[in-house]
Amino acid sequence: MESQESQDAPDVPDVQRAFICASFNQDTTSLSVGTKTGYRLFSVTAVDKLDCIHEGECPDVYIVERLFSSSLVVVVSLSMPRRMNVYHFKKGTEICNYSYSNNILSVRLNRQRLVVCLEESVYIHNIKDMKLLKTLLNTPTNPTGLCALSVNHSNSYLAYPGSATIGEITVYDANNLSTLTLIQAHDSPLAALTFNASGTKLASASEKGTVIRVFSVPEGQRLFEFRRGMKRYVSISSLSFSADAQFLCASSNTETVHIFKLEQHSPSQDEESPTWSTYMGKMFTAASTYLPTQVSDMMHQDRAFATVRLNMFGLKNICSLATIQKLPRLLVASSDGCLYIYNVDPQDGGECVLVQKHRLFESSEDEVEQKEEEDPEDVVPQPASQSYAATVALPSTPPCSTTLLGYSEDGGAQKGDVIPEHEFAESPVCLDDENEFPPVSKPE
Protein backbone atom coordinates (compact mmCIF):
# COMPACT_ATOMS: atom_id res chain seq x y z
CA MET A 1 0.00 0.00 0.00
CA GLU A 2 1.73 3.11 -1.21
CA SER A 3 1.18 6.59 0.11
CA GLN A 4 -0.60 9.26 -1.88
CA GLU A 5 1.61 11.96 -3.33
CA SER A 6 1.32 15.45 -1.84
CA GLN A 7 -0.52 16.78 -4.87
CA ASP A 8 -3.24 14.15 -4.40
CA ALA A 9 -3.82 15.08 -0.75
CA PRO A 10 -2.91 18.74 -0.26
CA ASP A 11 -4.60 18.95 3.14
CA VAL A 12 -2.71 16.04 4.69
CA PRO A 13 -0.07 17.22 7.22
CA ASP A 14 3.59 16.60 6.41
CA VAL A 15 3.93 14.16 9.30
CA GLN A 16 1.30 11.96 7.65
CA ARG A 17 2.93 12.14 4.24
CA ALA A 18 5.74 10.07 5.77
CA PHE A 19 3.37 7.08 5.60
CA ILE A 20 4.38 4.56 2.91
CA CYS A 21 2.89 1.18 3.80
CA ALA A 22 0.99 -0.71 6.48
CA SER A 23 0.24 -4.35 7.26
CA PHE A 24 -1.43 -6.33 10.03
CA ASN A 25 0.28 -9.42 11.39
CA GLN A 26 -1.26 -12.86 10.96
CA ASP A 27 -3.65 -12.72 13.93
CA THR A 28 -4.34 -8.95 13.81
CA THR A 29 -2.70 -8.26 17.16
CA SER A 30 -0.07 -5.98 15.65
CA LEU A 31 0.14 -3.25 13.00
CA SER A 32 3.36 -2.57 11.08
CA VAL A 33 3.86 0.81 9.40
CA GLY A 34 6.61 1.81 6.97
CA THR A 35 7.65 5.46 6.71
CA LYS A 36 10.17 7.74 5.02
CA THR A 37 12.50 7.42 8.01
CA GLY A 38 11.91 3.85 9.22
CA TYR A 39 9.17 1.61 10.49
CA ARG A 40 6.96 1.25 13.56
CA LEU A 41 5.30 -1.74 15.18
CA PHE A 42 2.10 -1.15 17.15
CA SER A 43 0.10 -3.39 19.46
CA VAL A 44 -3.62 -3.37 18.61
CA THR A 45 -4.93 -5.49 21.48
CA ALA A 46 -6.87 -2.61 23.09
CA VAL A 47 -9.32 -0.11 21.66
CA ASP A 48 -8.39 2.99 23.62
CA LYS A 49 -4.63 2.50 23.61
CA LEU A 50 -2.20 2.09 20.73
CA ASP A 51 1.21 1.07 22.04
CA CYS A 52 4.30 1.53 19.86
CA ILE A 53 6.28 -1.68 20.44
CA HIS A 54 9.32 -0.82 18.37
CA GLU A 55 10.75 1.83 16.06
CA GLY A 56 13.43 0.99 13.51
CA GLU A 57 15.52 3.42 11.52
CA CYS A 58 15.73 2.64 7.81
CA PRO A 59 14.95 5.05 4.96
CA ASP A 60 11.81 4.64 2.85
CA VAL A 61 10.47 1.32 4.15
CA TYR A 62 7.81 0.07 1.73
CA ILE A 63 7.49 -3.49 3.06
CA VAL A 64 7.43 -4.38 6.76
CA GLU A 65 5.98 -7.69 7.97
CA ARG A 66 5.98 -9.06 11.51
CA LEU A 67 5.53 -12.76 12.26
CA PHE A 68 2.65 -13.09 14.73
CA SER A 69 3.81 -11.62 18.08
CA SER A 70 7.39 -12.75 17.70
CA SER A 71 10.46 -10.55 17.37
CA LEU A 72 10.95 -11.50 13.72
CA VAL A 73 10.33 -8.64 11.30
CA VAL A 74 11.03 -8.46 7.56
CA VAL A 75 11.96 -5.07 6.07
CA VAL A 76 12.46 -3.90 2.47
CA SER A 77 13.53 -0.35 1.64
CA LEU A 78 13.15 1.75 -1.51
CA SER A 79 16.86 2.49 -1.28
CA MET A 80 17.59 -1.23 -1.89
CA PRO A 81 14.36 -2.69 -3.31
CA ARG A 82 15.99 -6.02 -4.27
CA ARG A 83 17.19 -6.76 -0.76
CA MET A 84 15.19 -8.33 2.07
CA ASN A 85 16.42 -7.86 5.64
CA VAL A 86 15.19 -10.11 8.44
CA TYR A 87 15.65 -8.78 11.98
CA HIS A 88 15.20 -9.90 15.57
CA PHE A 89 14.09 -6.45 16.68
CA LYS A 90 14.20 -7.01 20.44
CA LYS A 91 17.82 -8.14 20.30
CA GLY A 92 18.70 -5.55 17.69
CA THR A 93 20.33 -8.17 15.47
CA GLU A 94 19.99 -8.98 11.80
CA ILE A 95 19.22 -12.65 11.24
CA CYS A 96 19.92 -12.63 7.52
CA ASN A 97 19.45 -10.74 4.28
CA TYR A 98 18.85 -11.92 0.73
CA SER A 99 19.16 -10.10 -2.58
CA TYR A 100 17.08 -11.04 -5.61
CA SER A 101 17.20 -10.58 -9.37
CA ASN A 102 14.50 -7.91 -9.38
CA ASN A 103 12.57 -5.61 -7.06
CA ILE A 104 10.73 -7.26 -4.17
CA LEU A 105 7.01 -6.55 -4.47
CA SER A 106 5.62 -8.41 -1.46
CA VAL A 107 6.59 -10.71 1.41
CA ARG A 108 4.34 -13.23 3.17
CA LEU A 109 5.19 -15.44 6.13
CA ASN A 110 3.85 -18.00 8.58
CA ARG A 111 5.62 -20.17 11.14
CA GLN A 112 6.81 -22.58 8.46
CA ARG A 113 7.47 -20.53 5.33
CA LEU A 114 8.63 -17.11 4.15
CA VAL A 115 7.58 -16.19 0.61
CA VAL A 116 9.08 -13.40 -1.50
CA CYS A 117 7.19 -12.31 -4.60
CA LEU A 118 8.81 -10.59 -7.57
CA GLU A 119 7.10 -9.53 -10.78
CA GLU A 120 7.77 -12.81 -12.59
CA SER A 121 9.04 -15.19 -9.90
CA VAL A 122 8.31 -16.42 -6.38
CA TYR A 123 10.87 -17.56 -3.77
CA ILE A 124 9.95 -19.90 -0.93
CA HIS A 125 12.17 -20.03 2.17
CA ASN A 126 12.12 -22.31 5.19
CA ILE A 127 11.62 -19.92 8.07
CA LYS A 128 13.47 -22.14 10.56
CA ASP A 129 16.86 -21.48 8.98
CA MET A 130 15.93 -19.07 6.16
CA LYS A 131 17.23 -21.47 3.51
CA LEU A 132 15.76 -21.17 0.03
CA LEU A 133 13.67 -24.24 -0.76
CA LYS A 134 12.08 -23.45 -4.10
CA THR A 135 12.11 -20.82 -6.82
CA LEU A 136 9.06 -20.55 -9.05
CA LEU A 137 10.38 -18.95 -12.22
CA ASN A 138 8.50 -17.44 -15.16
CA THR A 139 5.26 -16.99 -13.27
CA PRO A 140 2.65 -14.80 -15.04
CA THR A 141 3.46 -11.09 -14.91
CA ASN A 142 2.40 -9.84 -11.49
CA PRO A 143 3.27 -6.12 -11.31
CA THR A 144 1.74 -5.58 -7.85
CA GLY A 145 3.24 -8.72 -6.27
CA LEU A 146 -0.21 -10.07 -5.50
CA CYS A 147 -0.06 -13.26 -3.43
CA ALA A 148 -1.50 -14.78 -0.27
CA LEU A 149 -0.04 -17.31 2.17
CA SER A 150 -2.13 -19.26 4.65
CA VAL A 151 -1.19 -18.34 8.22
CA ASN A 152 -1.78 -21.97 9.23
CA HIS A 153 1.66 -23.61 9.09
CA SER A 154 0.11 -27.07 8.62
CA ASN A 155 -1.61 -25.84 5.46
CA SER A 156 1.06 -23.54 4.04
CA TYR A 157 -0.95 -22.83 0.92
CA LEU A 158 0.25 -20.10 -1.39
CA ALA A 159 -2.05 -18.36 -3.89
CA TYR A 160 -0.90 -16.14 -6.74
CA PRO A 161 -2.15 -15.16 -10.22
CA GLY A 162 -2.10 -17.99 -12.74
CA SER A 163 -2.65 -15.59 -15.62
CA ALA A 164 -1.94 -11.96 -16.41
CA THR A 165 -5.08 -11.55 -18.53
CA ILE A 166 -7.85 -13.39 -16.64
CA GLY A 167 -8.61 -14.04 -12.98
CA GLU A 168 -7.01 -17.46 -12.67
CA ILE A 169 -5.56 -18.43 -9.28
CA THR A 170 -2.70 -20.88 -8.77
CA VAL A 171 -2.87 -22.59 -5.38
CA TYR A 172 0.53 -24.00 -4.38
CA ASP A 173 1.46 -26.23 -1.43
CA ALA A 174 4.47 -24.44 0.07
CA ASN A 175 5.13 -27.30 2.49
CA ASN A 176 5.32 -30.08 -0.08
CA LEU A 177 6.47 -27.75 -2.89
CA SER A 178 3.85 -28.77 -5.43
CA THR A 179 0.93 -27.19 -7.28
CA LEU A 180 -2.45 -28.08 -5.83
CA THR A 181 -5.03 -26.62 -8.18
CA LEU A 182 -5.92 -23.86 -10.63
CA ILE A 183 -9.09 -21.87 -9.92
CA GLN A 184 -10.93 -19.97 -12.65
CA ALA A 185 -12.11 -17.21 -10.33
CA HIS A 186 -12.87 -14.14 -12.50
CA ASP A 187 -12.98 -13.00 -16.11
CA SER A 188 -10.63 -10.06 -15.51
CA PRO A 189 -7.19 -10.06 -13.78
CA LEU A 190 -6.97 -10.50 -10.03
CA ALA A 191 -6.73 -7.56 -7.62
CA ALA A 192 -6.91 -9.16 -4.14
CA LEU A 193 -6.44 -12.56 -2.48
CA THR A 194 -6.64 -13.82 1.09
CA PHE A 195 -6.94 -17.11 3.00
CA ASN A 196 -8.93 -17.70 6.15
CA ALA A 197 -7.01 -18.60 9.32
CA SER A 198 -7.21 -22.37 8.80
CA GLY A 199 -6.29 -22.24 5.11
CA THR A 200 -9.52 -23.94 4.04
CA LYS A 201 -11.07 -20.94 2.26
CA LEU A 202 -9.70 -18.48 -0.28
CA ALA A 203 -11.34 -15.15 -1.17
CA SER A 204 -10.62 -13.23 -4.36
CA ALA A 205 -11.56 -10.05 -6.20
CA SER A 206 -10.78 -8.89 -9.71
CA GLU A 207 -9.68 -5.54 -11.11
CA LYS A 208 -13.34 -4.66 -11.76
CA GLY A 209 -13.94 -4.86 -8.02
CA THR A 210 -17.66 -5.58 -8.19
CA VAL A 211 -17.77 -9.28 -7.26
CA ILE A 212 -15.94 -11.09 -4.47
CA ARG A 213 -15.83 -14.88 -4.48
CA VAL A 214 -14.87 -17.47 -1.86
CA PHE A 215 -13.52 -20.91 -2.77
CA SER A 216 -12.77 -24.07 -0.83
CA VAL A 217 -9.12 -25.10 -0.52
CA PRO A 218 -7.63 -27.28 -1.87
CA GLU A 219 -10.64 -28.37 -3.98
CA GLY A 220 -11.24 -24.96 -5.54
CA GLN A 221 -15.03 -25.21 -5.35
CA ARG A 222 -16.94 -21.92 -5.32
CA LEU A 223 -18.66 -21.52 -1.95
CA PHE A 224 -19.88 -17.90 -1.85
CA GLU A 225 -20.31 -14.95 -4.16
CA PHE A 226 -20.78 -11.39 -2.95
CA ARG A 227 -21.56 -8.20 -4.85
CA ARG A 228 -19.69 -5.18 -3.56
CA GLY A 229 -21.52 -2.79 -5.89
CA MET A 230 -22.46 -2.01 -9.45
CA LYS A 231 -19.79 0.64 -9.98
CA ARG A 232 -17.06 -0.48 -12.34
CA TYR A 233 -13.30 -0.19 -11.95
CA VAL A 234 -13.25 0.04 -8.19
CA SER A 235 -9.80 -0.84 -6.86
CA ILE A 236 -10.05 -3.43 -4.06
CA SER A 237 -7.10 -2.78 -1.73
CA SER A 238 -7.61 -5.55 0.83
CA LEU A 239 -9.66 -8.61 1.79
CA SER A 240 -9.69 -10.16 5.26
CA PHE A 241 -11.56 -13.00 6.97
CA SER A 242 -12.56 -12.92 10.61
CA ALA A 243 -10.76 -15.48 12.79
CA ASP A 244 -13.76 -17.82 12.70
CA ALA A 245 -14.25 -17.32 8.92
CA GLN A 246 -17.85 -16.24 9.48
CA PHE A 247 -17.23 -12.79 8.03
CA LEU A 248 -15.19 -11.28 5.21
CA CYS A 249 -14.35 -7.59 4.84
CA ALA A 250 -13.29 -5.71 1.72
CA SER A 251 -11.88 -2.21 1.39
CA SER A 252 -11.25 -0.19 -1.75
CA ASN A 253 -10.45 3.30 -2.99
CA THR A 254 -14.04 4.35 -2.25
CA GLU A 255 -15.34 5.60 1.09
CA THR A 256 -17.14 2.33 1.89
CA VAL A 257 -15.81 -0.82 3.56
CA HIS A 258 -18.07 -3.85 3.09
CA ILE A 259 -18.46 -6.77 5.50
CA PHE A 260 -20.04 -9.96 4.16
CA LYS A 261 -21.47 -12.83 6.18
CA LEU A 262 -20.58 -16.35 5.09
CA GLU A 263 -23.72 -18.32 5.75
CA GLN A 264 -25.54 -20.99 3.81
CA HIS A 265 -29.30 -20.55 3.49
CA SER A 266 -30.92 -23.93 4.20
CA PRO A 267 -34.31 -24.73 2.62
CA SER A 268 -35.64 -26.04 5.95
CA GLN A 269 -35.08 -22.66 7.63
CA ASP A 270 -36.90 -20.88 4.80
CA GLU A 271 -39.91 -23.16 5.15
CA GLU A 272 -40.07 -22.72 8.92
CA SER A 273 -40.12 -18.91 8.73
CA PRO A 274 -41.55 -17.87 5.35
CA THR A 275 -41.00 -14.18 4.61
CA TRP A 276 -41.40 -11.88 1.65
CA SER A 277 -37.64 -12.07 0.98
CA THR A 278 -37.79 -15.86 1.13
CA TYR A 279 -40.64 -15.87 -1.38
CA MET A 280 -38.77 -13.52 -3.71
CA GLY A 281 -35.66 -15.66 -3.34
CA LYS A 282 -37.58 -18.70 -4.54
CA MET A 283 -38.97 -16.70 -7.46
CA PHE A 284 -35.45 -15.62 -8.45
CA THR A 285 -34.23 -19.21 -8.22
CA ALA A 286 -37.00 -20.39 -10.51
CA ALA A 287 -36.40 -17.53 -12.94
CA SER A 288 -32.65 -18.12 -13.06
CA THR A 289 -33.18 -21.41 -14.88
CA TYR A 290 -34.18 -19.62 -18.09
CA LEU A 291 -32.45 -16.23 -17.75
CA PRO A 292 -28.99 -15.50 -19.24
CA THR A 293 -26.08 -16.74 -17.08
CA GLN A 294 -24.81 -13.25 -16.21
CA VAL A 295 -28.26 -12.22 -14.96
CA SER A 296 -28.88 -15.39 -12.97
CA ASP A 297 -25.41 -15.14 -11.38
CA MET A 298 -26.19 -11.59 -10.22
CA MET A 299 -29.43 -12.80 -8.60
CA HIS A 300 -27.54 -15.32 -6.51
CA GLN A 301 -24.95 -12.82 -5.23
CA ASP A 302 -25.32 -11.78 -1.59
CA ARG A 303 -25.07 -8.15 -0.56
CA ALA A 304 -23.04 -6.68 2.29
CA PHE A 305 -24.09 -7.65 5.80
CA ALA A 306 -22.49 -4.56 7.33
CA THR A 307 -20.76 -1.42 6.05
CA VAL A 308 -18.45 1.34 7.19
CA ARG A 309 -18.53 4.86 5.75
CA LEU A 310 -15.05 6.31 5.88
CA ASN A 311 -14.52 10.06 6.01
CA MET A 312 -12.11 9.91 3.10
CA PHE A 313 -12.25 9.09 -0.61
CA GLY A 314 -9.47 7.89 -2.91
CA LEU A 315 -6.96 7.08 -0.16
CA LYS A 316 -5.53 3.58 -0.05
CA ASN A 317 -6.17 1.54 3.07
CA ILE A 318 -6.13 -1.97 4.49
CA CYS A 319 -8.82 -3.51 6.67
CA SER A 320 -8.95 -6.44 9.06
CA LEU A 321 -11.53 -8.08 11.30
CA ALA A 322 -10.42 -8.78 14.86
CA THR A 323 -11.72 -9.58 18.32
CA ILE A 324 -10.46 -6.90 20.69
CA GLN A 325 -11.45 -6.95 24.35
CA LYS A 326 -13.90 -9.78 23.57
CA LEU A 327 -15.88 -7.81 20.98
CA PRO A 328 -15.78 -7.99 17.15
CA ARG A 329 -14.06 -4.97 15.59
CA LEU A 330 -13.13 -3.73 12.16
CA LEU A 331 -9.68 -2.12 11.88
CA VAL A 332 -8.86 0.22 9.00
CA ALA A 333 -5.31 1.54 8.55
CA SER A 334 -5.39 4.40 6.07
CA SER A 335 -2.75 6.28 4.15
CA ASP A 336 -3.97 9.43 5.90
CA GLY A 337 -1.77 8.17 8.76
CA CYS A 338 -4.57 6.95 11.04
CA LEU A 339 -5.94 3.69 12.42
CA TYR A 340 -9.73 3.58 12.71
CA ILE A 341 -11.50 1.07 14.97
CA TYR A 342 -15.19 0.27 14.46
CA ASN A 343 -17.68 -1.86 16.39
CA VAL A 344 -19.35 -4.63 14.37
CA ASP A 345 -22.78 -6.03 15.25
CA PRO A 346 -22.44 -9.78 14.48
CA GLN A 347 -26.20 -10.35 14.73
CA ASP A 348 -27.83 -7.49 12.84
CA GLY A 349 -24.95 -5.96 10.87
CA GLY A 350 -25.83 -2.59 9.40
CA GLU A 351 -23.75 0.55 9.73
CA CYS A 352 -20.68 0.06 11.93
CA VAL A 353 -19.91 2.64 14.60
CA LEU A 354 -16.52 4.36 14.89
CA VAL A 355 -15.27 3.95 18.46
CA GLN A 356 -11.64 5.10 18.20
CA LYS A 357 -9.24 6.92 15.89
CA HIS A 358 -5.49 6.69 16.47
CA ARG A 359 -2.89 8.86 14.76
CA LEU A 360 0.08 6.68 13.84
CA PHE A 361 2.60 9.53 13.72
CA GLU A 362 1.37 11.82 16.46
CA SER A 363 4.21 12.87 18.77
CA SER A 364 3.05 14.17 22.14
CA GLU A 365 4.67 14.71 25.55
CA ASP A 366 2.79 11.67 26.80
CA GLU A 367 4.37 9.53 24.07
CA VAL A 368 7.85 10.77 24.97
CA GLU A 369 7.30 9.96 28.64
CA GLN A 370 5.95 6.54 27.71
CA LYS A 371 9.04 5.72 25.63
CA GLU A 372 11.31 6.70 28.51
CA GLU A 373 9.47 4.30 30.80
CA GLU A 374 9.64 1.38 28.35
CA ASP A 375 12.00 -1.51 28.86
CA PRO A 376 15.17 -0.67 26.89
CA GLU A 377 15.19 -4.23 25.58
CA ASP A 378 11.90 -3.54 23.80
CA VAL A 379 13.17 -0.57 21.78
CA VAL A 380 16.55 -1.20 20.22
CA PRO A 381 18.21 0.74 17.38
CA GLN A 382 19.12 -0.95 14.12
CA PRO A 383 22.01 -3.41 14.47
CA ALA A 384 25.57 -2.33 13.85
CA SER A 385 27.07 -5.78 14.35
CA GLN A 386 27.95 -8.20 11.59
CA SER A 387 24.91 -10.08 10.30
CA TYR A 388 24.50 -13.80 9.79
CA ALA A 389 24.18 -13.29 6.06
CA ALA A 390 27.52 -11.45 5.96
CA THR A 391 29.25 -14.57 7.26
CA VAL A 392 27.90 -16.82 4.51
CA ALA A 393 27.79 -14.45 1.53
CA LEU A 394 30.32 -14.83 -1.23
CA PRO A 395 33.09 -12.20 -0.86
CA SER A 396 32.60 -11.07 -4.45
CA THR A 397 28.83 -10.75 -4.20
CA PRO A 398 27.81 -7.06 -4.20
CA PRO A 399 24.58 -5.83 -2.62
CA CYS A 400 21.47 -6.21 -4.78
CA SER A 401 23.21 -8.75 -7.02
CA THR A 402 21.32 -11.00 -9.40
CA THR A 403 21.97 -14.06 -7.25
CA LEU A 404 20.88 -14.95 -3.76
CA LEU A 405 23.50 -14.23 -1.16
CA GLY A 406 25.28 -17.39 -0.19
CA TYR A 407 24.62 -19.25 -3.46
CA SER A 408 26.66 -19.32 -6.65
CA GLU A 409 25.33 -18.07 -9.99
CA ASP A 410 24.97 -21.60 -11.35
CA GLY A 411 23.10 -22.80 -8.26
CA GLY A 412 19.59 -24.11 -8.11
CA ALA A 413 18.19 -20.65 -7.42
CA GLN A 414 18.67 -19.76 -11.06
CA LYS A 415 17.27 -23.05 -12.33
CA GLY A 416 14.25 -23.17 -10.09
CA ASP A 417 15.40 -26.36 -8.36
CA VAL A 418 14.92 -27.13 -4.68
CA ILE A 419 18.07 -26.00 -2.85
CA PRO A 420 19.30 -27.42 -0.65
CA GLU A 421 17.92 -30.80 0.40
CA HIS A 422 16.19 -30.10 3.67
CA GLU A 423 14.20 -31.93 6.32
CA PHE A 424 11.08 -30.13 7.47
CA ALA A 425 10.80 -29.17 11.10
CA GLU A 426 8.65 -31.57 13.13
CA SER A 427 6.87 -28.62 14.71
CA PRO A 428 6.70 -24.89 13.95
CA VAL A 429 9.54 -22.80 15.26
CA CYS A 430 8.67 -21.04 18.51
CA LEU A 431 10.05 -17.64 17.66
CA ASP A 432 9.31 -16.22 21.11
CA ASP A 433 11.67 -18.74 22.69
CA GLU A 434 14.99 -16.97 23.30
CA ASN A 435 16.81 -20.33 23.38
CA GLU A 436 15.59 -21.24 19.90
CA PHE A 437 15.54 -17.86 18.22
CA PRO A 438 17.30 -16.72 16.08
CA PRO A 439 16.95 -20.14 14.40
CA VAL A 440 20.28 -19.85 12.59
CA SER A 441 23.87 -20.48 13.59
CA LYS A 442 27.05 -19.03 12.19
CA PRO A 443 29.36 -21.50 10.45
CA GLU A 444 32.58 -22.39 12.23
Image: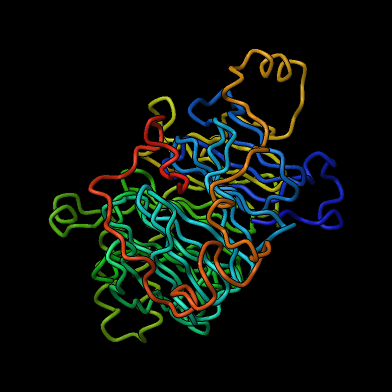
Q: Quadrant of the N terminus?
A: bottom right
Q: Position of residue 216 (x, y in %)?
A: 27, 64
Q: Is residue 250 above or below residue 291?
A: above
Residue sitting nearer the eye, 50 or 355 = 50
Q: Residue at x 55, y 54 (%)?
A: 251
Q: Is residue 368 left or right of residue 197?
A: right
Residue sitting nearer the eye, 74 or 231 = 74
Q: Residue at x 39, y 76 (%)?
A: 417
Q: Quadrant of residue 217?
A: bottom left
Question: From this viewpoint, which residue is outermost toward the front?
Answer: 444
Residue 81 in view of the camera: yes
Residue sitting nearer the eye, 341 or 430 = 430
Q: Position of residue 403 (x, y in %)?
A: 57, 70
Q: Is residue 339 above or below residue 258?
A: above
Residue 350 in view of the camera: no
Q: Residue at x 64, y 65 (%)?
A: 397
Q: Is residue 271 above or below residue 167?
A: above
- Number of marks in the image? 0
Q: Position of residue 36 (x, y in %)?
A: 77, 46
Q: Residue at x 59, y 58 (%)?
A: 252
Q: Position of residue 174 (x, y in %)?
A: 34, 63
